[in-house]
Amino acid sequence: MGTPLDIREHGTVIRFDADTLPTMEPRLFDADWLKDNQLWLGSAEGRGQAHFLRYADSDMVLRHFQRGGLVGRVIRDQFFRFGAVKSRAFREFDLLCEMRAAGLMVPRPLAARYAPSGLLYRAAIITERIPNAKTLQEILCNIPLQAPTWGAIGAAIKQMHNHSVFHSDLNCRNIMIDADENVWIIDFDKCETRTPGNWMQGNLDRLLRSLRKTAGQVPNLHWNEADWAILMAGYSDQGETA
């Protein structure tokens, strides 16, 4: 992707990929406008509702940033203002750009919006939708994965760690596998680059807890502890980058 461009209007800043969006339409961040113009394809719940859309011959995902926990019950989609560059949307957009440039299998960032209001701001991001892909959780609810795919998941996580990227919520819904068995990692909200450390094992521990929790909730989930051992072998075999 080329160098991202910024547009500003009345304090709102939008950063976008001009290769995919040569003319940025600010209303792409408005789900109601998407629906009114037959661009909206559906939605899915996650750490905030994700809207699927088709625009400029590309399938995209729109996600508005939301708070969790007790604070989120009072201020659901607003954050304290520290400037566009430090906003959650721009941090995720820029991190995805860096990871894509390094050859990692992550969604292509298309646009990010920072909309300030007083001391607070709202934010949203649009990424490219991964074609013909399902989440690891969705797949395991229906069929088992073969050993090479478990190994590939471990290798993908190690590649991310080799580039010093911390994932704040690595779980079985944020790993996707496409029709060609490629492994993708998604949802980099509140993620960042860090000096290598114990957080790497923490990422793995979080994913294992997610798998075990899902196994406890879904009868006959196609997963067992032996699969985890294969994943960890793929993680170890990936090695370190120079």
Image: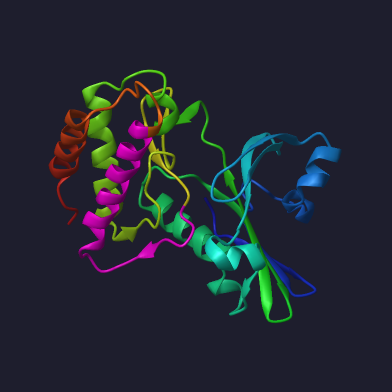
Instruction: Work out whether residue 75 can be spotted.
Output: no
As rendered, which of 171 and 14 lies closer to the eye? Answer: 171
Magenta range: 188-216
- Per the image, is 146 magenta? no
Q: Is residue 169 above or below residue 219?
A: below
**Residue 155, image quadrant:** top left
**Residue 95, image quadrant:** bottom left
Q: Position of residue 129 (x, y in %)?
A: 56, 38
Q: Is residue 194 left or right of residue 18?
A: left
Residue sitting farthest toward the right: 36
The residue drawn where x is 19% and y is 53% is 241
Residue sitting farthest toward the top: 143
Q: How is the rendered protein coloured? A: rainbow
Q: Quadrant of the C terminus?
A: bottom left
Q: Position of residue 4 (x, y in %)?
A: 58, 60
The residue drawn where x is 76% and y is 46% is 31
**Residue 173, image quadrant:** top left
Q: Is residue 191 above or below residue 235?
A: below
As rendered, which of 196 and 25 lies closer to the eye? Answer: 196
The residue drawn where x is 35% and y is 52% is 102
Q: Is residue 80 left or right of residue 165?
A: right
- Per the image, is 199 magenta? yes
Instruction: Work out whether residue 151 can be spotted.
Output: yes
Secondary structure mostly seen in the magenta stretch:
helix
Q: Is residue 150 left or right of residue 173?
A: left
Q: Position of residue 65 (x, y in %)?
A: 60, 58
Q: Position of residue 54 (x, y in %)?
A: 70, 35
Q: How many marks?
A: 0
